[in-house]
Image (cartoon, grey):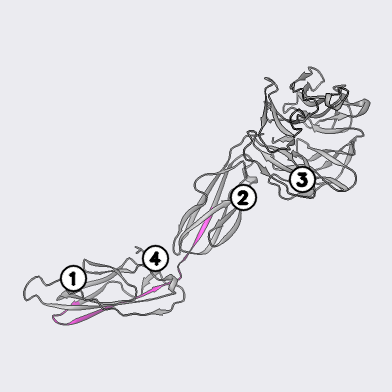
């Protein structure tokens, strides 16, 4: 039973039934010769069957309660002669009495008096309103889906509101889905709610995306792009584009988009997508081989490798121009003024060049590749391959050098003969470098690793193999 009544609305059908209950002892005479009479109660309720009060009403005569009275019943009550008040209570919120609830009756000895109640129950619906509040890094870039049990789905943004109208009143369940792997919704999810009649239930989901800059790594896993937390948790697949092969992801400044290379039979190109894998867009026109994209610090341009030459293109796919005629692995300096790359052949090693194509400078003379500028712009990490005469005698390690070519330092001493390392990428605070590598002493499987450029400590990121070409979100 319920404790509130509301106004009428809806279309109704009349329901009727009669039931007689003798209640002569409900208010018995106080002694011999007490005058008594009878009150005849008639209840009539109309409305759609699913909207009627399932547990009936409470009937009161003065201060006497008769709970659990069925919604379409008649009953007689023996009461002492005199004036009495009769009324109903505990109606469902969508049910109301037509006319006055309290009825004044006067009982005479040996006589009967009637009190009739006409109840109408309107359509029992309400509404649900779902709010999202997202905190943390790039909070406004996230999007979710709200699901209301038995009703459907509605999309909503990071800090947003959606409404589900005309929801049948009662207990329902609301679920927030499509939550990014680096975010956590506080509280219950799914969340039970009670939808009130003719009113709105409000649900607020607070989502926290707590990771600081650089706390997410994108990488190539087999033919697709994935993201993972540095401890190996929150693994998420972003692309599923078979028969294509997606590779070499690169985060945009702010971490809202990812550039990557895509290879298919007879074609390749540079693409961009949202950080969740959506809105994939091709930037380059078909023809030749495309790989190794790198965003400019202001996000306006992307450098990439096209047929072993360094090219620049606007982030919207316009104005592609060649920067270096023979090179690979471009990476922008943090101030956007220079680009590091690896030369080829007799001009091998790590080079830098002005973003305008002038003032190139050679930093190393060895078989070095895949340069990665440190976040403060003072150093460049790269991969060095020492040729030992046979492929199984080669050694590969990660080095760093100052941006002017001084202070060459070896970071790893992996001695992975017959294997390889490469693709160094700096964490945003400069404290750690992620890279990929495989040891053919073991199983030649590509894996992701971390190295501290100061302590030289190396740790593996536990991800499924193969895993290569990491890119740390900045």
Which residue corresponds to mark 1?
26
Which residue corresponds to mark 3?
272
Task: Note whether 115 is above or below 460 in the view shown.
Answer: below
Q: Quadrant of residue 387?
A: top right
Of helix, strand and loop, which one carries label 2?
Answer: loop
Q: Are marks 3 and 4 in contact (CB under 8 Å)?
A: no
Which-is-in-front pick, marks 4 and 1?
1
Please tell me which residue is depicted at 73% across the width and 50% down the height of the picture: 279
Of pointers 1 and 3, the one earlier in the residue sequence: 1
Which residue corresponds to mark 2?
178
Left-right relation of 333 to 360: left
| Segment colored magenta | 106-130
Q: Nearer the viewer, residue 210 or 234?
A: 234
Task: Note whether 21 is above or below 369 in the view shown.
Answer: below
Quarter holding the N terminus is: bottom left
Which residue corresponds to mark 4?
93
Q: How far apart in space, not on screen, are marks 2 and 1 (Cα)?
A: 61 Å
Percent coordinates x, y for residue 131 in the rendering: 54, 52
Please tell me which residue is depicted at 43% across the width and 70% down the height of the picture: 51
Residue 177 visible in the snapshot: yes
Of pointers 2 and 1, the one earlier in the residue sequence: 1
Of pointers 4 and 2, the one earlier in the residue sequence: 4
Q: Nearer the viewer, residue 356 or 132?
A: 132
């Amino acid at each position: 039973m319920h404790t509130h009544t509301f106004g009428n609305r809806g279309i109704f059908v009349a329901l009727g039934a009669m039931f007689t209950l003798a209640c002569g002892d409900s208010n018995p005479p106080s002694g011999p010769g007490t005058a008594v009479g009878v009150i005849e109660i008639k209840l009539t309720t109309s409305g759609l069957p699913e909207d009627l009060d399932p547990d009936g009403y409470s009937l009161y005569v003065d201060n006497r309660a008769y709970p659990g009275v069925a919604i379409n019943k008649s009953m007689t009550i023996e009461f002492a002669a005199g004036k009495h008040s009769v009324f109903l209570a505990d109606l469902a919120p969508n049910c109301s009495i037509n006319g006055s609830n309290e009825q004044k009756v006067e009982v005479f000895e040996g006589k009967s008096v009637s009190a009739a109640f006409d109840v109408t129950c309107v359509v029992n619906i309400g509404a649900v309103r779902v709010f999202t509040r997202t905190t943390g890094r790039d909070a406004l870039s996230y999007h979710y889906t709200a699901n209301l049990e038995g009703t459907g789905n509605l999309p909503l943004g990071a800090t947003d509101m959606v409404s589900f109208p005309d929801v049948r009143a009662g207990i329902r369940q609301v679920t927030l889905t499509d939550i990014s792997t680096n975010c956590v919704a506080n509280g219950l999810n799914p969340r039970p709610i009670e939808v009130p009649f003719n009113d709105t239930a409000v649900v607020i989901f607070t989502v926290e995306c707590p990771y600081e800059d650089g706390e997410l790594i994108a990488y190539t896993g087999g033919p697709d792009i994935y993201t993972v937390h540095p401890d190996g948790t929150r693994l998420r697949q972003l692309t599923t584009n078979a028969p294509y092969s997606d590779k070499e992801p690169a985060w945009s400044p702010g971490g809202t988009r990812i550039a990557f290379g895509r290879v298919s039979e007879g074609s390749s190109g540079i693409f961009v997508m949202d950080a969740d894998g959506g809105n994939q867009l091709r930037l380059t026109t078909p023809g030749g081989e495309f790989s190794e994209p790198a965003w400019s610090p202001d996000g306006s341009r992307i450098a990439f490798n096209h047929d072993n030459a360094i090219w620049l293109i606007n982030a919207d796919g316009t104005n592609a121009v060649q920067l270096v005629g023979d090179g690979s692995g471009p990476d922008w300096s943090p101030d956007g003024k220079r680009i590091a790359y690896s030369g080829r052949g007799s001009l091998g090693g790590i080079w830098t060049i002005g973003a305008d194509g002038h003032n190139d400078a050679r930093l190393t003379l060895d078989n070095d590749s895949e340069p990665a500028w440190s976040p403060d712009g003072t150093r460049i990490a790269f991969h060095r391959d020492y040729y030992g005469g046979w492929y199984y005698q080669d050694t590969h390690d990660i080095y760093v050098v100052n941006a002017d070519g001084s202070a060459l330092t070896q970071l790893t001493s992996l001695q992975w003969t017959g294997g390889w390392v490469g693709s160094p990428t700096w964490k945003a605070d400069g404290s750690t470098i992620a890279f990929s590598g495989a040891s053919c002493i073991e199983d030649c499987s590509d894996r992701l690793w971390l190295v501290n450029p100061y302590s030289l400590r190396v740790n593996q990121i536990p991800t499924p193999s193969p895993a290569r070409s990491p890119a740390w979100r900045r």
